Every structure is written in structure tokens, then in C-alpha cells.
């Protein structure tokens, strides 16, 4: 029996995208065409690969097994391309690097710009998402390397510490606590905060830090993403704990002010992450070397 790799790839996209419509959109195909190709794959294997009995499709036991092998097949194909590219150096190629929301927004653009200056022949792209989304992209092979806040939670990913990210307590200029010296937990009692959306890793760090300061469950406004959060603070909706990488420009410009605290805020590691069993391309290896050169946080005036 010969397995049609084109149909296998379409089937894998249906499983990864969790639906025929989403897979069709990604593959630039019509939904009936995607459904037809998957059905022909099932006919060739004489088994049902996808349970279509409910509103949300899910793989059968046979489908789960095939999807696991398919992922390995296409990852091996990517590694074969990488191995061939080892012979051609860095004259041509493609790089897709991932980043968690904060790191992807405030660190990756400058890193990729420097990479582009060094290797102008490499086509470079940036993928930004929350940690869970970036992890899925790394596991599927869509992204080869990523810079994320925290350590990887998946056993098949390996991360190396790169930097430390410190949370900074920020307020709009003229806030009553600005210039008052080190801020204590008692002084924060009654203050309204702007916090990242529930489920965000930053939100977890914010809540742990505030709890450690004796400020548990303060009145707050949720903000989806760091840019919205900063705009909320500038608009006077509250004060916030924000990554030092995210507020470097605002602190330099004076549109936000850092409030020194009596107790230190929590820090988190910034990790360079890749899949443990992936053979990296020359382009990916070169990016990792560039990132390893970055050992200093932004100069925002908040460190001694």
C-alpha cells in the first residue's frame, strides 16, 4: 500500500486546526476539497480517521495514531531540508522565529532586524502568540526556535536561560504615589490596578507579586495585551506591574513613571526554546547565536 503524502498532509492540518474549515483556510483550498481528500485517505486505509458525529471533529484512535506518525514524517522532511541547507550556508533560506506576547513584541523585532542585516539573503518572519500557542507551533515544526517568558513546560522542548525579566510598578505621571519614596503594600491598599487578561502568564506573575506584598485581589481592570495595558495606565484607569521590556520606551519618554517598591517585584527567566529532537537549519542556528549575544535588559532607568 502506498500512502499519499499530499492527502496525509491535508489530514494532519485538519487535526491540528481542529476542523475542515480552518484547515481549508490555511491550505487555501475549499472545504469540500479538503473533506474529499481526507475521505479518499480513509478509503485507501480502509478505516475511519475522523469522528464526524459531533459539532467539533476529533480523530478516532486510528486517526490519532496516524497523526502522530504524520507529524514525525513531515518533521523528518523538514530536517532533511535543513541537512541539505547545511551545505549551502546562509546565502539563502527561511527563518520563522516565535515569541511569547511580551518578548515577541518588544525583543524580537530588533533581534530579527539585526539578523536581517547580517544575513540579508534569509527570508525572515516573526510569529507572536501566548506561551501555549508558541509551544504548539514549536511542537508542530511550524516554528524552529522561539524566545519566551518562562521555561518550556513541554518535555520535548529544551530551553536555555537568556535574560531575566523584572516586573516594574508603573503609574501615569503625577500619580499621588510618584516621588513618595519606596512604595509599601499598605500604601497600595485601595489602589486600582490594570492587570493582563486571565490565563496570561504575566497575569499570574502580577497576582503572585501583589499577594506577596499583601495586596490580594485588588480592584482592577483587565487588559488584553501589554499595549492595551499601558494605554489604560496612561489614561488613569489604574497602576500596573509590567515587564521592564514592555515599558522601556515609555519610562524614557516620561509618559509613564516607575514607582520604587519596598519589596522587590518578581522576576522571570526569558528562555531561548527549541524542540529537543529537531535538527536546526543554518538560519536557525545563526539566529540562536545572535540571541545568545543579548545579555543585557533594556536601559530604562529602573535599574541601579
Image (spheres, helix red, strand yellow):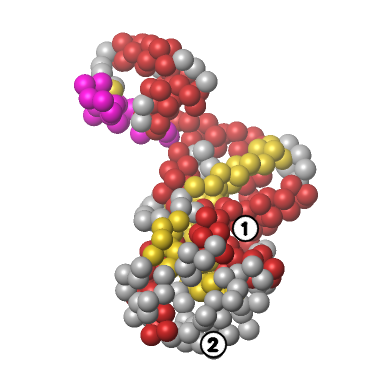
Q: Which image quadrant: the C terminus? A: bottom right
Q: Is residue 60 visible?
A: yes
**Is 61 left, or right, of 23 in this rendering?**
left
Return the residue at label 1: 107
**Is 77 left, or right, of 117 in this rendering?**
left
Q: Which image quadrant: the N terminus? A: top left
**In the foreground, 240 or 35:** 240
Q: Is residue 275 above or below residue 123?
A: below
Residue at 41%, 58% (x, y): give it.
222
Where is residue 80 drawn, in percent x and y?
57, 34
**Segment tinted magenta in the rendering:** 51-72
Occupied quadrant, residue 257: bottom right
Return the residue at label 2: 180
User: How many neighbours does mark 2 have within 10 angstroms: few (below 14), some (14-19), or many (20 or more)?
Assistant: few
Q: Secondary structure at mark 2?
A: loop
**In the foreground, 63 or 108:** 108
Amino acid at each position: 500500500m502506498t500512502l499519499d503524502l499530499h492527502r496525509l498532509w491535508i489530514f494532519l492540518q485538519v487535526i491540528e486546526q481542529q476542523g475542515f474549515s480552518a484547515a481549508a483556510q490555511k491550505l487555501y483550498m475549499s472545504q469540500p476539497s479538503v473533506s474529499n481528500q481526507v475521505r479518499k485517505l480513509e478509503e485507501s486505509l480502509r478505516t475511519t480517521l475522523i469522528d464526524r458525529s459531533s459539532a467539533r471533529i476529533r480523530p478516532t484512535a486510528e486517526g490519532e495514531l496516524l497523526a502522530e506518525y504524520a507529524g514525525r514524517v513531515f518533521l523528518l522532511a523538514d530536517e532533511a531540508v535543513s541537512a541539505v541547507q547545511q551545505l549551502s550556508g546562509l546565502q539563502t533560506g527561511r527563518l520563522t522565529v516565535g515569541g511569547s506576547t511580551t518578548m515577541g513584541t518588544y525583543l524580537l523585532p530588533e533581534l530579527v532586524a539585526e539578523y536581517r542585516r547580517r544575513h540579508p539573503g534569509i527570508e525572515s518572519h516573526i510569529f507572536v502568540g501566548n506561551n501555549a500557542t508558541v509551544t504548539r507551533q514549536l511542537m508542530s515544526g511550524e516554528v524552529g526556535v522561539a524566545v519566551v517568558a518562562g521555561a518550556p513546560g513541554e518535555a520535548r522542548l529544551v530551553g536555555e536561560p537568556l535574560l531575566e525579566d523584572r516586573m516594574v510598578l508603573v503609574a501615569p505621571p503625577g500619580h499621588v504615589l510618584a516621588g513618595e519614596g519606596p512604595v509599601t503594600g499598605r500604601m497600595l491598599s485601595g489602589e486600582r490596578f490594570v492587570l493582563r487578561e486571565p490565563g496570561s502568564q504575566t497575569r499570574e506573575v502580577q497576582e503572585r507579586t501583589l499577594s506577596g506584598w499583601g495586596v490580594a485581589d485588588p480592584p482592577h481592570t483587565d487588559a488584553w495585551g501589554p499595549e492595551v495595558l499601558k494605554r489604560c495606565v496612561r489614561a488613569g484607569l489604574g497602576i500596573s506591574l509590567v515587564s521592564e521590556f514592555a515599558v522601556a520606551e515609555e519610562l524614557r519618554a516620561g509618559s509613564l513613571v516607575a514607582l520604587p517598591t519596598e519589596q522587590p517585584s518578581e522576576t522571570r527567566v526569558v528562555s531561548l526554546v527549541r524542540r529537543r529532537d529537531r535538527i536546526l537549519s543554518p538560519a536557525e542556528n545563526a539566529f540562536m547565536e545572535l540571541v545568545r549575544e543579548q545579555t543585557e535588559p533594556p536601559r530604562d532607568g529602573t535599574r541601579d
